[in-house]
Amino acid sequence: MENFKKRGLSRLFFVLIFSLAGFLNGFAGAGGGMVTGVLLPFFFKEEEKKNAFAYTALAVLLYSAVSATGYLFLGRLPVDTALSNVLPALVGGALGGFLLRKINPALLQGVFALLLIYSGVRFLWG
Amino acid sequence: MGLIAFLIPLVIGILAGLGIGSGGIYLIYLDFFTDTPQGEAQGLNLAFFVAALLSSVVYHLFRRTYRHHDLLAALPCGIPFAAMGAYLSFLSDPGLVKGFLGVIFLLAGGYTLLFRTSLYSLLVGKSTSSKRRKRT
């Protein structure tokens, strides 16, 4: 973080990153975490980089809550289905956080990256 | 059916907790395996990630990870854009939003494949696991 200040860059970058992440989350219902997850680590010292995920989680949580409220008011959030997902999502999220210390998710990330590319192609040309 | 309806979000929640997913994995499931309309799928994905990330944020709050005031001060700037994005999405053609999502997924998938998997270690000749051990 100090290095970032020394490089003479301003807080404006954070404002731009979070604004873009918020917009993507609201517009597409996903993708805010991609922006913060990719860009924020560049502003952290090597030993602090793992903390960047904590800020990504906080930003996505905040923007998802705001966007979901908007979707609710616009009639695009089926409340019963959303509520039925709360418990498994809470349990799964906590379990994933616990497993993060036990396993190396690199292989899963590779599989998921291919799934993302496949989905991207299908969304664009499917 | 009830068990499957519980297990699918549970597994996706685990993947989200592992930091895998870029927030889109539940959206992909809804789009490809159910007949949920695009707008509702986006809304459900957002609500899902509020729940899935809650435990992670609470954990970091207890560990006092959030100490960088510059970042915390800039965080609320995204809120009006999130609300604006939600409204613009409502006004937009679902096909346009799908195309936009396609671009996001291709970028996220390409980035993950190149820089966060063993393909990256093959390219730079380092093991990601040994790199992780060194950091911790």
Image (cartoon, helix red, strand yellow):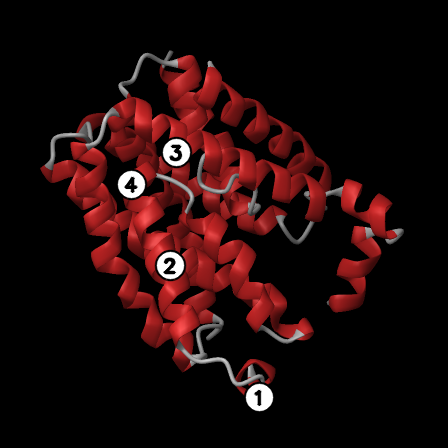
Work out whether disc 4 and disc 2 sit on a shared chain: yes
> Label 3 is placed on what type of residue?
Phe
Q: Is residue B49 among what the camera can see?
A: yes
Work out whether disc 4 and disc 1 sit on a shared chain: yes
Where is A57 relative to B89, above or below? below
Where is A62 relative to A16, above or below? above
Q: Which residue matches tag 3?
A: B100
> SS for tag 1?
helix
User: How many other residues sit within 10 Å of disc 4, few (<14), some (14-19) or many (≥20)?
Assistant: many
Residue at mark 3: chain: B
> SS for tag 3?
helix
> SS for tag 2?
helix
Where is B62 relative to A26, above or below? below
Q: Nearer the viewer, mark 4 or mark 2?
A: 4
Q: Is residue A103 among what the camera can see?
A: no
Q: Which residue matches tag 4?
A: A27
Where does residue B75 sit, x and y in percent of width and height? 33, 67
Residue at mark 4: chain: A
For image coordinates 28% across by 66% down, the residue present is B77
Q: Which residue matches tag 2?
A: A59
**Apparent side of residue B54 relative to residue A79 in the rendered image (left or right):** right
Mark 4 vs mark 1, CA separation in Å? 35 Å
Choose between B125 and B88: the one closer to the eye: B88
For image coordinates 29% across by 60% down, the residue present is B78
Where does residue A3 sit, x and y in percent of width and height? 60, 83
Q: Nearer the viewer, mark 3 or mark 4?
A: 3
Mark 3 vs mark 2, CA separation in Å? 21 Å
Q: Which residue matches tag 1?
A: A6
Mark 2 vs mark 1, CA separation in Å? 25 Å
Q: Name the mark on residue B123.
A: none
Work out whether disc 3 and disc 2 sit on a shared chain: no
> Label 4 is placed on what type of residue?
Phe
